[in-house]
Amino acid sequence: MRWSLKIGRVSGIGLYLHVTLLLLFGLIAYAGFVEMGTRGAAWSLALVAVILTCIMLHELGHSLIAQRLGVQVRSITLLPIGGVAALKSIPEKPWHEIAITLAGPTVNLAIAVALMPFTGLPPHLFLISMPYDIHSFLATVVNANLTLFVFNFIPAFPMDGGRLFRALLALVMSFPRATVIAAMVGQGLAILFVLVGLKFSLWLVVIGVFIFIGAEGEEKIVRTRSLLRDLEVEEVMARDFVVLAPTATVMRGLEMVYHTGQNDFPVMDGDRLLGIASRQDMLDTANRLGRDVPVREAMDTGLPSVPPDARLSQVYETMMVEGYQSLPVVRDGQLIGLLSHDNISRYLLVQSNLKPSRRRRAVLAHTPAPPPATPSVPPIEAPRSPSELSPPASPA
Ligand SMILES: [Zn+2]
C-alpha cells in the first residue's frame, strides 16, 4: 500500500504503518495534553501504541493461521480504521476462511483474558476512556480488546463477522452467491446503524457509512474475481499498442496519449523492453524538466513482467495491492502484450453486459452446419494462435 512505512517483518510478512496514523498519534497526544498536560499526552500516546499493537497481533493471528493453511500473506498494514492483512489469494474452502477469520478476534479475547486477573471486568464496557495511571491503563487495554472482539463479530464486511457469515453461507451455496447475501445483510445493518446513530451517536453513523462502503467493495471484488477466475492474462491483454523509443521526447509520448487512447507506453530499445512510461509520469517530467526530455527519463523500470499464461485474477489482485496501472506481458523475453486496469474493466464491461442465452444460441446455430455440397470454397485458414502473432508493437 502506498504511503506506508515499514516497521518490521514477522514470518516473512512485512508489517507497515500508514502515514495517516502519525496524524492520529498527533491528534491523540494533543487531546491528552489538553485534558491532563504532558502526563495526559504520554498516557494517551502509550494507550494508542498498545491498542495498535493489539490490532497488529489480531492481524498476525489471521495471517499465521492463513500461512498454516497454505494461503500466502503479502503484508499487514495498520490504518486509522484498523488493520488490513493482504492475502495473496483468497481461501477457497469455507472451513479455511472460518479458521482464518476466527483467529483474529481470538487473539483479542486472549489478551483481555490474560490481563483480567489484574483489572477485573471493566465497569464501562466498550467505552474507551483516557487512562491516568497503570491500573486504569490496563483496564482500558482490556476494554479495547473486548470491544475489538465483540465489534468484529458484527456480520458485515469489512468486519470479520461479515467474512464468517459469508463462509457459513458458502457451506451451503456458491461463494459469489454467499457474498451477495452477506453484503446485503451487512448493508441492511449499516443503514440501521446510521438511522440509530442519527438519534444517539455520531460515531454509529460513521461506522454505518464505513460498513456500507466496505460491503459494496467486497461484493465488487468477488464479482470481479468470479468473472476473471478461469482466465489467463493473454485472453484480456492489449495486443495492439504503441511503443516508444527511449529517445522519443515526453511531448511525443503525451501526443500519443490522445492519438492512440493509450495511457501507458512500453519503452523499447529495439527488442528490449526498458520500462513503461505512464501518462502521469510523462506529464510530471514534462512540467518539471521540460517537454523535450527523452522518455527514458520518465519511465518506470521497476515493474514486474507477467507471463501470458499467468492467472488473471492473481495478477489483477497484485495490481490492486501494489498500485500498478499496467504491466508488460512477456514470453521468451519478447513483449507480446500490455495488461492494464483499462483492459480488465473493458473486459468486465463486455462480459457483464453479455446475455448468457445469446452465446448458447450462437453455438446452436453453428453446430449443425451441413457439409458443403461441393468443395468449391477454399478451406478456411485455421486461426493463428497468439504465439504465432508477431509482437503487435509499432515503434513511434
Ligand atoms: Zn480481523
Image: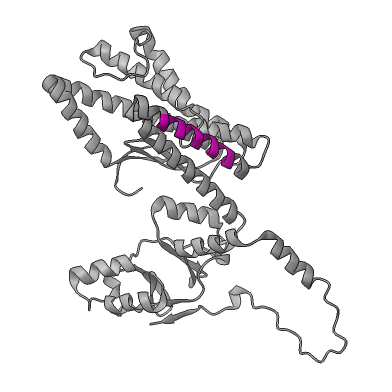
Relative side of 285 to 196, left or right: left
Q: Is residue 187 magenta?
A: yes
The answer to whether 331 is drawn above or below residue 76 in the figure is: below
Q: How many marks do you count on the picture?
A: 0
Stretch of the chain drawn in magenta: 179-195
Q: Residue furthest bottom?
A: 376
334 sits left or right of 126 in the view: right
Q: Is there any visible trace of residue 37 in the rendered image?
A: yes
Q: Residue at the location (46% across, 37% down)?
A: 158
Image quadrant in which you'd find residue 54:
top left
Q: Position of residue 80 (x, y in %)?
A: 31, 36
In the image, residue 214 sits, relative to residue 57, either above or below, namely below
Give the prevailing secondary structure in the magenta stretch: helix
Extreme-right residue of the structure: 373
Percent position of residue 282, x then y = 29, 70
Is 34 rendered above or below residue 124? below
Location of residue 265 in the rendering, given as x and y in whole percent from the top left corner: 38, 72
Residue at the spot x=16%, y=21% of the render?
40
Question: Is 101 inside the magenta-drawn segment?
Answer: no
Taking the spot 52% from the left edge, 36% from the top edge, the residue there is 66
Q: Image point 65% across, 42% down: which residue?
A: 174
Q: Quadrant of ligand 1?
A: top left
